[in-house]
């Protein structure tokens, strides 16, 4: 597998209920099918209450990596929620990191209760850009809602990741794994979601 570096470290981050663990599982299976050695490690906050959920996906042609990457060693952040992108970049970022982020916020309970304010999304995105070598932004949640199912944002983000051309996988690789992991009745909609994410990011090139 052609990787920009080895190991290549990806973090897929979101909050509980966004489906980033499934997204990391699908990505890992795709890359294994392409001949890579993939290690996936997850860390959970209070995920049932909308807390942070983070998946480390470590990809190598040579060796099995430890499940969690060291500080400052992330190569790509895929964030299903914009503040989570900043959280990851603060600890795992470096000058060469690239970031793909959903722009739709999910407000934590402290914000909903009025105890703290959620920063303006444009401010968050500006900080993400300042901390990344390159950034792609899409409103995956809005696209998923247009499909009638907000949970599809995780698959839209996988399609967007494919569209960045950072990792060597394609739509056929996704379809093969999705057919194994997802109910047959949902495969068609997931392929549509993947295609929409991929096409949206390609428009940004």
Image (cartoon, helix red, strand yellow):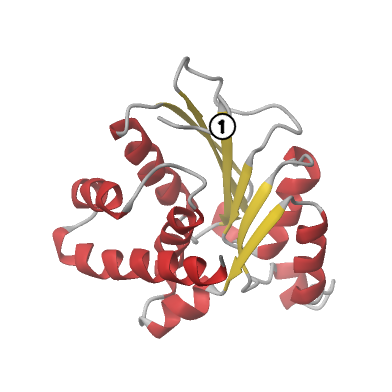
For the point 76% across and 33% down, the residue is 72
Residue at the far top: name it: 63
For the point 56% across and 69% down, the residue is 204
Q: Residues within 10 Å of mark 1 (few under 14, many from 20)?
A: some
For the point 72% across and 61% down, the residue is 83
Q: Position of residue 82 (x, y in %)?
A: 68, 64
How many circles with numbers are drawn on the protein?
1
Q: Which residue is mark 1?
A: 8
Q: Is residue 44 left or right of residue 72?
A: left
Quarter of the rendering containing residue 37 = top left
Q: Position of residue 164 (x, y in %)?
A: 51, 55
Which of these two is toward me, 31 or 203?
203
Is 6 rendered above or below residue 99?
above
For the point 48% across and 66% down, the residue is 202
Is 151 rendered above or below residue 184?
below
Which of these two is toward me, 37 or 54?
37
Q: Report if residue 153 is visible in the image.
A: yes
Dot 1: element:
strand
Q: Position of residue 190 (x, y in %)?
A: 29, 65
Is 192 rendered above or below residue 20?
below
Q: Position of residue 75 (x, y in %)?
A: 64, 39
Q: Is residue 62 left or right of residue 147?
A: right
**Quadrant location of the N terminus in the rendered image:** top left
Is 44 rendered above or below residue 105?
above
Quarter of the rendering containing residue 145 = bottom left
């Amino acid at each position: 597998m052609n990787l920009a570096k080895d190991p290549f470290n990806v973090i897929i981050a979101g909050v509980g209920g966004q489906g980033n663990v499934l997204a990391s599982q699908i990505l890992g299976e795709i890359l294994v099918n392409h001949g890579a050695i993939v290690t996936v490690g997850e860390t959970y906050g209070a995920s049932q209450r909308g807390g942070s959920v983070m998946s480390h996906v470590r990809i190598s042609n040579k060796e099995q990596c430890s499940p969690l990457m060291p500080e400052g060693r992330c190569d790509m952040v895929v964030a299903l929620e914009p503040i989570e992108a900043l959280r990851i970049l603060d600890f795992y970022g470096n000058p060469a990191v690239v970031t793909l982020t959903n722009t739709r916020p999910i407000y934590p309970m402290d914000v909903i209760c009025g105890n703290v304010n959620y920063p303006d999304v444009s401010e968050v995105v500006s900080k993400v850009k300042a901390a990344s070598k390159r950034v792609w932004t899409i409103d995956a949640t809005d696209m998923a809602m247009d499909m009638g199912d907000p949970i599809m944002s995780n698959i839209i983000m996988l399609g967007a990741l494919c569209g960045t051309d950072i990792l060597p996988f394609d739509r056929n690789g996704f379809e093969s794994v999705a057919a194994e992991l997802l109910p047959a009745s949902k495969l068609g909609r997931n392929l549509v979601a993947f295609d929409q994410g991929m096409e949206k990011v390609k428009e940004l090139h």
